[in-house]
Amino acid sequence: MTDLNRTIDHTLLAPEATQADIDRIIREAKEHHFCSVMINPYWVAYAHQQLAETDVNTDTVIGFPLGANTTAIKVAETQQAITDGVDEIDVVMNIGEFKSGHFDAVTTDLKAVIQTAHDHDKLAKVIIETALLSDAEITRASELVADAGAEFVKTSTGFSTRGASVHDVTLMKQAVGDRIQVKASGGVHSKAEAEAMLAAGATRLGTSSGIAVMSEA
């Protein structure tokens, strides 16, 4: 199994995060060799510079946290993040359009962002916000994300009614099989919770509790 630290996207998306807070998570990510730091777009250029010559990626969010931005704005955000040095992008699906059954519109939106990332050899994850979906919708959304060409389908923004659950991850993994990977985000506060998500099929964890998880490892 992959070392636990290398599954963690060390996350700080709070709107009140200061430069000192960003410096802290960068320092922690370097110390623990986490997979990435996950920060808001404003901090991408700074984090990329601080993480140069390390094994920690710079990761950011697109269309966050609602997913209701226009496609053009999502693409522009992605292009800016790439210019600033991002390695991975996590884009929020247009949840309202998905729940309207407008799957073609959702797919078109996602493909535009994913293709922009792939044109520059960047990895793309799609957040489906499982808290707002039924089991059947989680399955359908996961399939749609796989069809759109992302590397990962991701559970949650952490800004909705709840984060990830083992049940969500199980459904998502069953839906995508080995086509793409699953990221569990939100609700991972301990080593036991991290291991439960991984056992259910996740290969990446988004958490602001990475230090607490590793302290128990």
Image: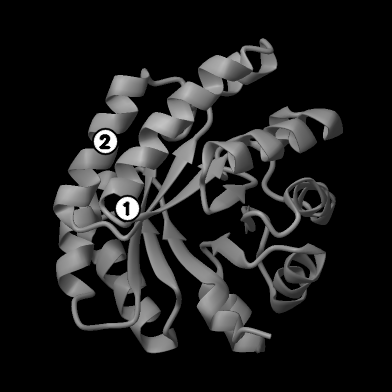
Q: CA distance from mark 1 to mark 2?
A: 20 Å
Please state if 96 lies on the left or on the right of 53 as rendered.
Answer: right
Q: Which mark is residue 107?
A: none
Q: Are marks 1 and 2 in contact (CB under 8 Å)?
A: no
Q: Compare residues 136 and 45 and report the one nearer the observer.
A: 136
Please state if 162 lies on the left or on the right of 55 as rendered.
Answer: right
Q: Position of residue 84 (x, y in %)?
A: 16, 53
Residue appearing at x 67%, y 47% in the figure:
163
The quarter in which the N terminus is drawn is bottom right
Q: Amino acid at mark 1?
A: Ala
Q: Secondary structure at mark 2?
A: helix
Q: Is residue 96 above or below residue 171?
A: above
Residue appearing at x 38%, y 30% in the figure:
112
Q: Which mark is residue 17?
A: 1
Q: How many marks?
A: 2
Q: Is residue 193 above or below residue 125?
A: below
Residue, disc 2: 77
The quarter in which the C terminus is drawn is bottom right
Q: Position of residue 130 (x, y in %)?
A: 70, 37
Q: Secondary structure at mark 1?
A: loop
Q: Residues within 10 Å of mark 2 (few under 14, many from 20)?
A: many
The image quarter in which residue 24 lies? bottom left
Q: Position of residue 44 (x, y in %)?
A: 23, 55
- Is residue 96 in view from this perspective? no
Q: Compare residues 179 and 11 and report the one nearer the observer.
A: 179
